[in-house]
Image: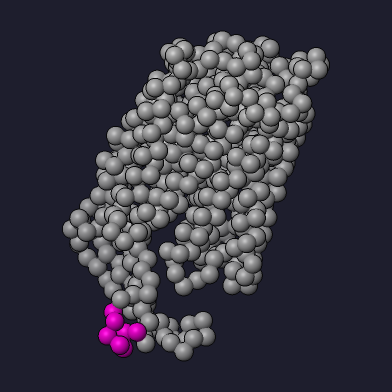
Amino acid sequence: MSSEKGIWKVIGASSVGTLIEWYDFYIFGSLATIISTKFFPPGNATTAFLATLATFAAGFIVRPFGALVFGRLGDLIGRKYTFLLTLVIMGGSTFLIGCIPAYQTFHFAPYLILILRLLQGLALGGEYGGAATYVAEHAPANKRGYYTSWIQTTATLGLFVSLIVIIAVQKSLSTEAYNDWGWRLPFLLSIVLVLVSIVIRMKMNESPLFAKLKSEGKTSTNPLKESFGKKQNMKMVLLALFGATMGQGVVWYTGQFYAQTFLLKTCNLEPTQANTWIGIALLLATPFFVFFGWLSDRIGRKGIMLAGMLLAVICYRPIFTAMYTMSDVKTKLEESSNITTKKIINPDNSNDSLIVKTTAASFVDGSKLLQTDKYSQAVIQTGNNKPLETKKTVTLAASYQWKLIALIFTLVIFVTMVYGPIAAFLVELFPTKIRYTSMSLPYHIGNGVFGGLVPFIATLITVTPGSNYLSGLWYPIGVAAVCFVIGILYLSNKTDENVNDDVNEYIHPKN
């Protein structure tokens, strides 16, 4: 076991690579709005956005398969080289996304984007388990929650870095240049970050626990069979999924990704303003990953994780209602407005003309609205005044800044409660020789499938006839509630001092 001084080098090397992988993975979600206009057929903005979210979700769905492939490699050949390989696959895929021509000139763009997104998902499926296992196998037993929680910060920091890069690019370019080609820069930049991380990871040593097993000839010859073919270990895999990672996954993606989608698409907030405020909230909340990891070493993992799920179930609707109310211009007193109309003759070589109506409104509270409505002249002549497309951009007054940041911060606190202790919890469930495989699968099903589908399913529910802006929350609330009940009944609240036992007992003796 490494000294506590040496553990920081291990954490640093593991965290840098994992942060970059999360950056690569989430840059797609952060740019989902503009990607929907670049890589998917025009004509129906809602359909294009749902297609983008579905492609985004595809990367999550394949994460369990990546967990099986790379988890098996990690238990056979070692932690170090496996998550070095995942880093290369992730970085290369992200870079190539930035190189793909737009749909107008390359109609195969949606399919190529999907393939690269699947490769990203496979790579991330192998990354997290390797990094968490690597750090845990270097850490002192009584500080495992604290040290592995530093790995947990990388997911949020990866999202934070992606937002910073996007905002920096937006501010350094004109709106026209950014929408034309500047949005590609965050994807292309990833190749530089990946090369730096590869150099760092090449200098890492193998996990001491795995190296010891390998030198003694005790590594698993068939990690998949030992992980899922033995009843007792499979029982722990299912308990980890339905009693912890399933709820943790939906809380994570609701608090950080669906919240962003909600602010941009449902509340129509101006992107730079929304992303800046989200970034501030993420930065303020990130230290709590470490706090709750540290706390779990003292009072146990169960209580903290389940409390985070319960708070999410209770508070989601009030918090999202408050965010929506702040941005709803119908509740604001209008101070002034200006309407301009222009006619575009034969757009896209069609025989019709397009009428574009732009409304710029200011409100007493200092907020502003810019709304663009596009009408078909041929349709207007038939007496139908329904616009073909409406785009709203709401810029909130500065007085709302800290109110909205506080709401987002609260959502991320729930994330830190469920996510801070989860790596130590999973590591302590499984024996060293099959740990990479065993812990990766439930983690990536819980996060990749249940959690990763939150933005898509919640948005799909929201646009269904008869639904309202809060309807999409029923999915994460329902999943978190079920996981909370299972966790209360079957998880133990103790931490395990020895991660090398064949299978650690995390269920009540009566079960």
Q: Is residue 68 left or right of residue 219?
A: left
Q: Is residue 168 left or right of residue 288?
A: right
Question: Residue 425: horizontal and vertical position, in percent?
Answer: 52, 22
Residue 10, picture quadrant: top right
Q: Nearer the viewer, residue 358 or 146?
A: 146
Colouring of the image? one colour
Res. 475 visible in picture:
yes
As drawn, the residue found furthest toward the left would be 333
The magenta stretch spans residue 80: no
Work out whether 253 lies above or below 99: above
Residue 487, picture quadrant: top left
The residue at 44%/69% (across/down) is 44
Question: Residue 354: horizontal and vertical position, in percent?
Answer: 40, 82
Q: Nearer the viewer, residue 12 or 505?
A: 505
Question: Residue 205: horizontal and vertical position, in percent?
Answer: 76, 23
Q: Nearer the viewer, residue 312 or 334?
A: 312
The span shown in magenta is 379-385
Work out whether 223 lies above or below 301: below
Res. 273 visible in picture:
no
- Position of the N terminus by quadrant: top right
Question: Residue 285: horizontal and vertical position, in percent?
Answer: 42, 31
Q: Is residue 204 left or right of residue 477?
A: right
